[in-house]
Image (tube, rainbow, N blue to C red):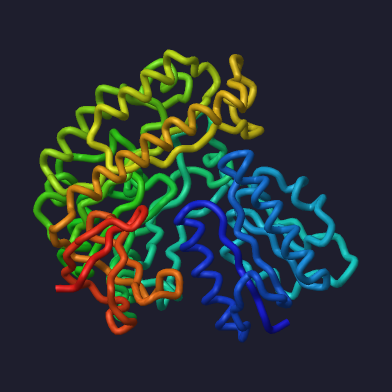
Amino acid sequence: MNTVALATLGCKVNQCETAYLEELLEGQGFQILPFTEKVDLYCINTCAVTGRAAMESRQFIRRAIRRNPKAQVVVLGCYPQVASEEVTAIPGVTQVLGTIEKLELLNYLPFPEENELPGVHVQDARKAPDAKPLTLFRFARRTRAFLKIQDGCNAFCSYCIVPYARGRSRSVTVASILEQVQQFLAHGHQEIVLTGIHLGHWGADLTPRQDLDALVGQVLDHCPPPRLRLSSLEPGEITAGLLDLLATSPRLCPHLHVPLQSGDEDVLRLMNRHYHPNLYRDLVMEATRRVPDLALGADVLVGFPGENDESFQTTYRFIDSLPIAYLHVFPFSPRPGTPAATMRDQVSPAVIRRRCHRLRELDRIKRLSFMQRYLGKTRPVLVENRLYDQGDMLCGFSDNYLPVLVQSDLSLGNRIILARFHRLHGNRLIARPI
């Protein structure tokens, strides 16, 4: 075997782990090719956060087997962790590795001979060791580098399989994080995104206990990247200290993604989400007051069991009343093994589709309104090494997460420039470098 293709489903943490596996495989002499190619080895880093995610994981597995029936097909991560029998039942799968084992992929080479049963290596996630720092030289083919600083979750939301797939919350040490930041900077990455399964819990298991805002301050002080961004944070985990940093540090991107899931307090209680809509409202209003250019995004889970027309309308009105820049709208799909899968008052798929449509239209309106605020204004933009539709414009993102097209050639790739936004093009702003 000398060629390999990797596919990643799900979260930014999975993307971090796939990048780590790519470097391991390259170090063993493998040539990394796109997943659309016929290769010797396919690695599918799966997701199982919803029933739909598990279905998409199966589709990727079968796609690899069809592309090259003689290839080795390794299924990794969350889906085999919670449903290994479903994975091994797919003819053509060679190896099955859980969330603990996948980071030790090289230990499972060589793979079983043809016609042997798949090797299944799935430990109990509750016995997961301390979080392992993923030492990377670079984040391949990316201008932004994702840095995994935490794994696992202790929240046990009633719809979520993640605590069963990832185990308890575990934090990477400060020293390892600072070392990886320096490594990314040495290879020219202009933006570093701190990410985790439950990012706001970083440091709670360390001795002595540490806080995320203190970590962010250390990164900004000791090895400051041109830009530092935070991935998703829960409402109760955004502290006054973190808002202070967002308001005062030009290197910390004015962008927060704060899952809401529902604006109805009864539905939140059924979800086992430990906050009241009023706490969320107060956070949003205070954050956007302190940081006027803040892009604040939210997740919404539509059609949770017990969500009736009235509670959906409460959620809709709640979101409509807030200065939210964008939404990620997810239809509820039962995930076997979670309490929500067997709850009463399941919502019909047709009703879920209608409600999702309404919220996605609200998302379109909010995104458009947020982008229009910046027409004629300037912001720093990180330009990617990626042409838009094979034209003469490069893709990029402003510090406050505005999707941008920059009129330039590839000489501006992987650079932060000051750009003026002068018109809209679909869901992006057209910008000219200053």
Position in image of residue 410 (x %, y %): 34, 82
Q: Nearer the viewer, residue 220 or 378?
A: 378
Residue drawn at (12%, 47%), measured in percent from left and top? 244
Q: Residue at x 40, y 59 (%)?
A: 148
Residues 28 and 5: in front is 5
Q: Would residue 341 appear left or right of 149 to someone viewing this image?
A: right
- Residue 183 sits above or below residue 205 on the image: below
Question: As displayed, is residue 33 above or below residue 191?
Answer: below
Closer to us: 256 or 368: 368
Question: How many marks can you see?
Answer: 0
Q: Nearer the viewer, residue 156 or 277?
A: 277
The C terminus lies in which quarter of the figure? bottom left
- Counting from the top left corner in percent of width and height, residue 202 is at 34, 48
Residue visible at 48% across and 33% down? Answer: 357
Image position of 227 (left or right of 140):
left
Image quarter of residue 237: top left
**Does 257 sit above or below residue 318?**
below
Task: Give x and y (percent) for residue 81.
Answer: 65, 48
Name of the residue lying farthest toward the right: 115
Q: Quadrant of the N terminus?
A: bottom right
Q: Is residue 350 left or right of residue 153?
A: right
